[in-house]
Amino acid sequence: MLMRTRGVEIRRDRPYTQRDLERIGTVKRLSDEQRLDMKVVASVLPFRVNDYVIEELIDWTKVPEDPVYQMTFPQRGMLPPAAYERMAGLHKLGADKSAINALAAEIRTALNPHPGGQMDMNIPHDDHGRKLWGLQHKYRESVLVFPAKGQTCHAYCSYCFRWPQFVGDKALRLSSSNPATLCDYLRRHAEVKDLLLTGGDPMVMKTGLLATYLEPLLAPDLEHVRIIRIGTKALSFWPHRFVTDPDAEELLTLLERMVKAGKHLAIMAHFSHWRELHTDIARTAIRRLRDIGVEIRSQAPVLAHANDDPDIWSRMWNEQVALGIIPYYMFVPRDTGAHCYFEVPLVRAWEIYRDALKRVSGLARTVRGPSMSAGPGKIEIQGVADVNGERVFVLRFIQGRNPDWVQRPFFAGYDEKASWLDQLKPAFGEEEFFFEAEYRAMEWRD
Ligand code: SF4
């Protein structure tokens, strides 16, 4: 919805969810079959878009192949075929909400809702051994906080690995409503240098609320937390947040105050396609953040049906560098949710990364990847090599649950179909990877 105030175009962030699918004008024009597919998939996986995504990011003349459409609208292949058929059967029979919800819950449980030990291994404890829900402390130097009011997004990515947080299942939520708990924990952990506010998308919070998390970090006893990262897709899905939202000015003032106080403040911007960089409002938002000294680093997974093409990545990284954004990570999509639809074999992900990197400025070669954020740590596929007649993947930890694992190369047998760590086997006849016994012990301890 557009309004005008003193010549500036103001847009209201109006979300559409599963219930509103039939209200979206462009969706009404799709075939009955496509609309049924959407309804079926959206009854299991979260769905949310806004007018900005619909009108300015999706090219509806290219639907269904359009990449932003693929990344935001439900597609049939996002559910395993048997699950799809069962849910479609209920819809065709006009089943009631409770039957649909019961089946949806069953299907979700089979979609690996908490990969990487998030529910069990990453939640820290207070002095009395109570779990501090809403915090994660997986790597020594970094803590993640999930503010309770930041657990939604301006639009949902259909490949999101945090999808369980958006489907109303409280058992799957990881959120914190208390900045004081966070600060107490940080005070007791001087080894933490880096705090990541994440979600959902913390930028859905009003500035006043965001300030309750950021401003206490200026206290002298939290000086050790020097880096503040905010994981967000607002620059892609709602750049108005930094330009025309009613509290946009207040937000920039808050971020600038943090920078001037000596914090390194980085927006960890989730950009999946160069198209997201092309609107005037996105460029204005990027410039405004850069002008106040905020760093913007970009990251995204490589996805079948959306961006599994080196041309897309090289163009995106080159354009980002020109805009002052630092390319940071290419991820491998996690083994959760709609993984069956978006998965890219590891070898293909590596080829895309490599081919893209050949075509970018040296300044864009800051980007790391393709990287799997798995239970033991962030593992990068460094390449494929032939060693003593055996074809292997060369891997390394970028981040490890044990910091000593970092940068240690290790090898897995080549498998052209493998798309995640658990499908890889150690090379050279080894029984297991060097970190596995220690990782098992960590799982037991927790
Ligand atoms: S913006 Fe991030 S948290 Fe939100 S749906 Fe997309 S990937 Fe998930």
Image: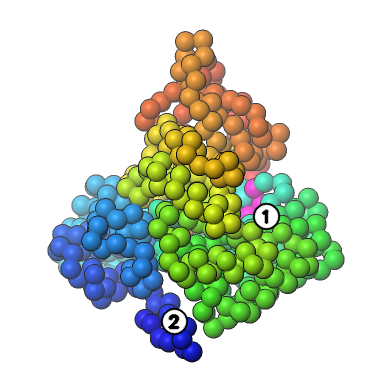
Pick whichever of labels 1 and 2 is earlier in the sequence. Answer: 2
In the image, residue 135 lies in the stretch drawn in magenta: yes
Q: What residue type is labelled 2?
A: Glu
Q: What residue type is labelled 1?
A: Val
Marks 1/2 in contact by CB < 8 Å: the verdict is no
Residue 330 to residue 283: above or below:
above
Instruction: Spot the residue most to the bottom.
Output: 6
Q: How crowded is mark 1: few (under 14 residues within 10 Å), some or many (20 or more)?
A: many
| Residue 415 shows in this picture | yes
Left or right: residue 267 versus residue 151 is right
User: Disc 1 vs disc 2: which is toward the camera?
Assistant: 2
Q: How crowded is mark 2: few (under 14 residues within 10 Å), some or many (20 or more)?
A: few
Left or right: residue 148 versus residue 78 is right
Q: Mark 2 points at which residue?
A: 9
Q: Which residue is drawn at 84% across and 64% down?
A: 221
Q: Mark 1 points at which residue?
A: 143
Left or right: residue 382 versus residue 22 is right
Give the image quarter of residue 203.
Answer: bottom right
Q: Position of residue 276 (x, y in %)?
A: 43, 60
Left or right: residue 328 versus residue 190 is left
Q: Give the range drawn in magenta.
A: 134-138
